[in-house]
Amino acid sequence: MREAPKKEKQVVRGAAPLEDANLAESLPEDESLIWQGRPEPKAIALRAMYLWYVVAYLLVLVLLRTGFLVMSDAPMSEWSALLAWQLLASLFIVGIILGLAVLYGRSTIYTLTNRRLILRTGAAVPIHVNFPLEKIASADLKVFSDGTGDIALKLENSDKLYWLLLWPNVRSWWVRPLQPLLRGLRDFELAASALASAASAQSPVSFGEFKSDYEDVSMAATALPRAQ
């Protein structure tokens, strides 16, 4: 008996190299892979871990502590040793933040099919979270000056989602209703277009919110869905 030929699935890949490309083989027959992408580690470090704020805080601590010793006429050997120790400790903290950003950037993959958006995240224990397209009420895009964009999702029911479970793929300073985030996309225009097309096939949509810190972005990236 001859085996039926496997259904060939079309994949529109993002700019980053992906590790979940074999997901197309495990999807149901009526579901196809449209787009995959992952966050840029720099975007995670700056916008999820607030790297520059941490650096500024550490520098202020170093300057205050060292300045206090200098003003109190402490021996040079004492305050210089303290300064060196504080700088090394600060560099260690910054190194941890950068390392975590790279780890989360490599372990996170966003997958869009014609039925759902799949978020694979988790540095130690990878998890998969599914967002059916018909449950996405709207999706808002913000583009940053570093050339990456964030897509915030507003869901019809987000009560069963948890901030710590999705972090850093969640909108900062926004606890309830929780908004999952496709963070730091280099190919945000491709992602926006793919998400708009897939969502419009499930329900009538209109434009979502668009914000930009970058004047040279194409207005085609504003084509994000908002369910009516």
Image (cartoon, grey):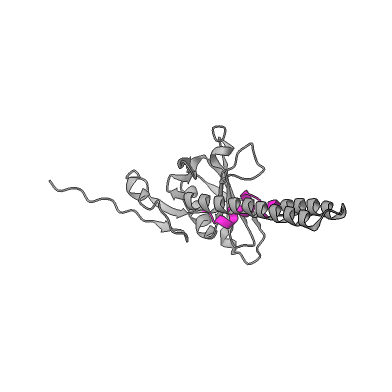
Seen at 42% across and 55% down, the residue is: 18
Seen at 61% across and 64% down, the residue is: 217
The reply to whether the magenta stretch includes residue 50 is yes
Residue 11 placed where, x, y %? Answer: 39, 56
Seen at 52% across and 49% down, the residue is: 104
Residue 46 vs residue 79, the one in the foreground: 79
Residue 148 placed where, x, y %? Answer: 58, 59
68 relative position to 192: left or right? right
**Type of secondary structure dominating the magenta stretch:** helix
Say if residue 7 shows up in the picture.
yes
Residue 35 vs residue 220, the one in the foreground: 35
Relative to 114, say whether 144 is above or below: below
Residue 126 placed where, x, y %? Answer: 45, 42
Residue 159 image-quadrant placement: top right
Residue 204 vs residue 153, the one in the foreground: 153
Residue 133 placed where, x, y %? Answer: 48, 43
Seen at 79% across and 54% down, the residue is: 66
The reply to whether the magenta stretch includes residue 140 is no
Q: How many numbered marks appear?
A: 0
Quarter of the image that includes the N terminus? top left
78 relative position to 198: left or right? right
Quarter of the image that includes the C terminus? top right
Q: Which residues are magenta?
A: 39-54
Query: Seen from this angle, which residue lies furthest left?
Result: 1
Query: Seen from this angle, which residue lies furthest bottom?
Result: 216
